[in-house]
Image (spheres, rainbow, N blue to C red):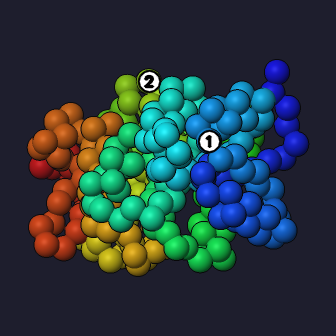
Amino acid sequence: MKTTNQIKVLMIDDDELIARSTSEYFTILGVKTAYVTSYDAALEFLEKQEVSLLLLDINLGDKSGFDLCRKVRENYDMPIFFISARTSDDDILIALNIGGDDYIKKPYTLNVLLAKVKAVLDRYEKARKAARNGMENGGGESNGNPAGGRICIRDDLYLDTATHKLTNHGKQEELRAMEYKLLLYLLENAGRVITRDELFDNVWEDVNTCDGTITVHIRHIREKIESDPKVPKIIKTVYGVGYMVETPQDMADS
C-alpha cells in the first residue's frame, strides 16, 4: 500500500551530493522532495509513495535513466524531467521520444529548475481541482471556451482543459505535461504564425531549449490529433519560422 506524506518530487541521480543538495533546496523552499541514487531504489520508492514529478538523470551506475523512464511510463503518468550532463541532440531526442517531458542540462541553476518544477506542479494541481469540480457539477462544455472545460479543435476532437486530455470521437487520450501546454498555446493563438522563439519564451520559458525538443513534441501531438500526421491539417509548419494552427472555420473551408 502506498503512503502519502506530501512528497511532490523524486530526484533520481547516482551523484548523491547533487541529489541531496537539490532535494534539500526544493524542500526548504516549499516543494517537498526526496532522492534516491539507483534504478532499483527509484522503483521501490514509487511503489510505496505518491509522487507528482520525477527529476531523472540518464547515468545511473550500471543502469540507464532511459530504461527507468520506459519502466515508469508503463505504470505511472507524471511529468518526467531528464537532468543530465550529456548534451548531444541524440540523447535529448531519445529522452523526449521515450516519455520525457523536458530535458535540463547540467550544471543547472537551482532557482531556475525550481521555478520550472513549480510551474508544472501548479498546472497539474489546477487540472486536478478543475476535474474534481467538473465531476461534482456534472461536467459541461463551453463551445470552445477554455474556462468551460473543452476547446474544439475540429469536429469530434476536443482539448479538455480540466483533465488535460484529448477527446477524439468520444475516446480520451492522455497528453504529457509539455504536450498539453504546447497544444493549448497553439490553440489559444490560432490563426497566426507562432515562431519557435515565442514557443521557447512562453511554453518552455527557457531560451536554452533546442529546436529538436519542439520538433519532437509537435510530432507527438500530431500523432494524436491528425488524421495523417505526415500530412498535417491542424498544426501547419511555416518553414524557417515556426507553426500555425488554423481556426476551425479555416479548416472547414480548406
Question: Left of 163 or right of it: where is 48?
Answer: right
Image coordinates of residue 30 in percent, x first then y, are 82, 65
Q: Residue at x 60, y 52 (%)?
A: 13
Looking at the picture, which amino acid does disc 1 mark?
Answer: Ser
Element assignment for label 1: loop
User: Is 60 situated above or below 156?
Assistant: below
Q: Please, which residue is most extreme toward the front here?
A: 62
Q: Residue at x 49, y 38 (%)?
A: 63
Is the C-beta separation of discs 1 and 2 under 8 Å? no
Q: Which mark is residue 225?
A: none
What residue would you read off at disc 2?
Answer: 171
Image coordinates of residue 139 in percent, x first then y, are 65, 34
Q: Residue at x 24, y 64 (%)?
A: 243
What residue would you read off at disc 1?
Answer: 38
Element assignment for label 2: strand
- In the image, 132 versus 113, the foreground residue is 113
Q: Is residue 159 visible in this depiction of the protein?
A: no
Q: Please, which residue is most extreme toward the top here?
A: 1
Tally the marks. Answer: 2
Looking at the picture, which amino acid does disc 2 mark?
Answer: Lys
Image coordinates of residue 5 in percent, x first then y, are 88, 42
- In the image, 58 versus 101, the foreground residue is 58
